[in-house]
Image (tube, rainbow, N blue to C red):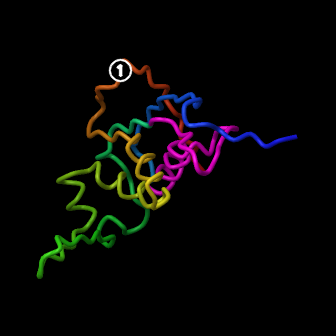
Amino acid sequence: MKSYLAKKGEVARKWWLVDADGQILGRLSTQIAELLRGKTKPEFTPNVDTGDFVIVVNAEKIKLSGKKELQKVYHRHSGIPGGFKTETVRYVRERQPRKIIEKAVRGMLPHTTLGEKQFTKLKVYKGSTHPHQMQKPVKLEIKRR
């Protein structure tokens, strides 16, 4: 018996809607990364993009455990001398709350061109509205431990 390998054009994709209100960042982002990679599907193939689309709403209401709100720091560098910037989660939440979820999920995906393609299927929005009503997303119940 041969093993099944998914082909590029024969993967059926679904749209999932996730409400981040009151969810813990790490637990939410691991489940989102599994959906984006397609690991929940029986036809999962590691070298083919078999994942689904994920829409995350209420990104500004995500929770972090412990004292990470004040202690967790994001680093970035512009590439010029003196261009190193650090900012806490509290500051990022005020400016661009969707970046918190995007950075957490991006770190859980493969750091290859396939991972970049899978990351483009993540749509994160501040507030409870999104422009993807025509795709009829299915509400995903996040498992709480």
Does residue 119 show up magenta in the picture? no
In which quadrant of the rendered view does residue 56 lie? top left
Looking at the image, residue 44 lies above or below residue 92:
above
78 vs 64, left or right, is left
Residue at left 33%, top 70%? Answer: 72
The quadrant the N terminus occupies is top right
Q: Which residues are magenta?
A: 25-53
Residue at left 24%, top 55%? Answer: 93
Residue at left 39%, top 35%? Answer: 55
Q: Position of residue 3 (x, y in %)?
A: 78, 43
Q: Position of residue 95 (x, y in %)?
A: 17, 53
6 vs 1, left or right, is left
- Extreme residue toward the right, this view: 1
In which quadrant of the rendered view does residue 125 lie? top left
Instruction: Say which of 98 and 69 sits in front.
Output: 98
Looking at the image, residue 130 lies above or below residue 75:
above
Q: Secondary structure at mark 1?
A: helix
- The amino acid type found where label 1 is placed reads Gln
Instruction: Say which of 37 and 58 sits in front.
Output: 37
Instruction: Say which of 52 and 103 sits in front.
Output: 52
Looking at the image, residue 96 lies above or below residue 123:
below
Q: Which residue is mark 1?
A: 133
Q: Position of residue 23 (x, y in %)?
A: 44, 47
